[in-house]
Image (tube, rainbow, N blue to C red):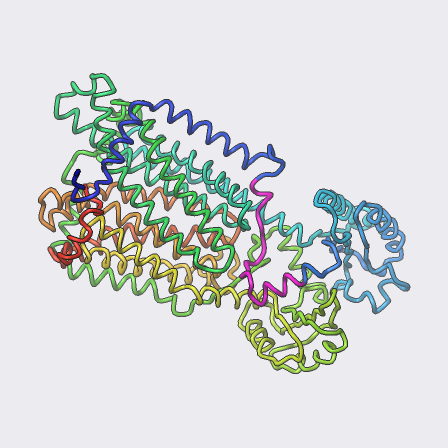
Amino acid sequence: MRHLPRTWNAGDVFDRLGAQIARHPKTVILVWLVLTLGCFAVTLTDVTGETLFDRLHTGAPGVPGSESAIANEIIDTETTTGPSLSLAVDGVDPADPALPDAMAAARTDLAAIDGVASVIDPYVVPDGPANPAVAGLLAQDGQGFLVVVELEHGLDATVEETALAAVEEQLAAIPGELSDAVGTTVTGQVGGETLIVKEITDQVEKDLQTGERIALPVALFVMVLVFGGLLSASMPLIGAIASIAGGLGSVLALSYWLEMDASVVNVVTILGLGLSIDYGLLIVSRYREELHALVDDDGGRAVRRRRGDGAVQRAMRTTMHTAGRTVTFSALTVAIAISGLLVFKPSILRAVSAAGVAVIVVAILSATTLVPALLVLSGRRLIKPGLIGRVPGLRGLIRRTGDVTSEEGVFSRLAGWVQRRPWLVMIGTLGVLAVLALPLGHLQLRNSSVELLPRGSDQSEYLQTIADQYPASESATAWVVAEAPLEDVTDWSSEVAALPEIASVDPPQAIGGYVVLPVRVDTDDPGGPDAVDAVRALRALDAPFPTWVTGQAATQIDFLDALLDRVWWAVAIVVVATLVLLFLMTRSLVIPVKALLTNVLSLSASLGVLVWAFQDGHLQDLLGFTSTGGIETYVLAMVVAFAFGLAMDYEVFLLSRIKEAWDKGAGNDEAVRRGLQRSGRIITSAAVIIVVVFTGFVFGKLLIIKEVGFSLAVAVIIDATLVRMLLVPATMTVLGRANWWAPAWLLRATRRIAIEH
């Protein structure tokens, strides 16, 4: 009977994969070329009838089955009105005698559009603006009025889209017609929910393009410095482009099963872009290191052998055996961190989790198949200085940054400096992290909606005009949906109005078998503390019939409650899985526990900076946003998952080289120095590139994308500098051989499944 090996060597799988790629590189590249072009075609063009961006959802994220979700579903199901668009006319006195005839003609043109149900303006009633019935349609400053066009309910999607476009065009033409009629310049702003949704989805696509235009060129420049040549630098970037295409294709496929929020596309794209460059960087660096070693060992003769059994194949097999396994293991830890979001009820978190894991799979497939195939085709040219490396002014810098052979260098010297004063470095680093984390003490969570629109955008200016000039047309702060006769709800509304948290109550409206009671709070912030208190008071009120409360504050409360309800399940899944994986990799119990603790500290510090910058608004002028007074709830959840995953990413990069040196017989301190020297350049370079990627999206306009990009960039900066370069070597020096401790019984029980070199 054949005996099982003492340990499962994952490197054997990657060794065979490397051998297959070395034999068939052109086939691998051709497959990826077809997949990349195909994914870009189906997601960015309308060859299937709609693009990925046409399938995106916008609006405040909800929680299926929650009170606010039930209320929203009732309103959506029972309402008999279609979508509407409005025109806010400005620069004319509504009492001008030329306006009634001009608006009558415009009203006739609008009503003639197929699908329009009604057109309302101040001149549809006797006496026009003088009639109190239309007071809500008149501007507060007496220099404007509203025109509201409502479509029929239940129109076919194509008919509705055509009608909305025609109405928008006709409304936009009215100010010009009025200018001719009254002899002065009249302006106007067209707005409505459909235009808000369109503006957000269009901005998502623009922000994605902006981020890529900034990130890709700068990433290429950094990698040229890292590798000393354009050829080596271009390979991780090619892998990243393929990953972007595959990631977008994955999101499109998932959109047929899950509701995809508009922000999901950018979030998972920047994650996939950053990770694929990170992984490609590690693969290329290790391959060049191995190829250098083979060439140096036999004086360069190996590279002249047939590719099938020469240095190229051997370098690739060793690369996949080591770096290929490391990046796959790293991707697994990131995927586990992000998959923790699946336990939560909010659909947006489930969508982010599913899409994030899918993109990670694409990134690791690209890094372990496409990038190696490109390396094989390049052969020995990768260890020769390129044209850029021969430029006199850059030659010395390129030689230092592109060095993959030295056991001594800046990072080993940094480790030595830390090891001579480990307690001082450890305490000092912990103190800095604690100070950065202090703003977390006043964290406020929000579920914003229209507040997320870019500053200065058409729809944000339209909404501001409505708020300033037409307060009666503004949405209520909350809505109570009641299952009762209209008369009963009318009687009960006086009890609602008597609540100290409520400013006023609008007349109840019957929809189907339900009644909707709009409630207003004396606040300009529909998700602020006053609105939250009002919703809690409404829900605590003992109504004589079934009621459900919805609105921004209500959705916010339900979302936060849903997070708190499942947060410990998510934490348990991530912690247990991470401990198990790191134990199987390091064969130590101490290192995984220490890694979790340091990552929590790093994450807390980065979240503290996020609160200081966005909630407190200290960077709103610099970054071009208006603070909402809090951090978006689901942004916080995403950042925690993604930043923790990225921190584990760099932890695996570093620990894999330290463990490699330890397994070869080096002492603890020597292994730390050698591991930091071998991985420090890659971690730093990867961190610079991924910070550039995330920063590129900070220059977008959507607040959500700014928050995610900024917080992840800060998290990577803190983790790759304070934590990986200082705190980790300091703590490993203090612990010494205790780093590698684990109970003997546990080592024996897991020896057959350990992941070893």
**71 magenta-colored:** yes
Q: Nearer the viewer, residue 144 or 363?
A: 363
Image spot of residue 618 (x, y percent): 44, 61
Which quadrant is home to the N terminus?
A: top left
Q: Nearer the viewer, residue 622 or 265?
A: 265
Q: Nearer the viewer, residue 679 or 141?
A: 679
Image spot of residue 276 (x, y percent): 37, 39
Q: Residue furthest front?
A: 1
Count up the numbered dots: 0
The answer to which quarter of the image holds residue 46 is top right
One can see residue 294 in this view: yes
One can see residue 421 in this view: no
User: From the viewer's perspective, is 681 left or right of 704?
Assistant: left
Which quadrant is home to the C terminus?
A: top left
The residue lying at 72 percent from left, 72 percent from top is: 506
The residue lying at 12 percent from left, 25 percent from top is: 297
Q: Nearer the viewer, residue 705 or 315?
A: 315
41 lies above or below 328: above
Image spot of residue 616 (x, y percent): 45, 64
User: From the viewer's perspective, is 708 left or right of 192?
Assistant: left
Residue segment shown in magenta: 52-74
**335 magenta-colored:** no
Image spot of residue 642 (x, y percent): 39, 52
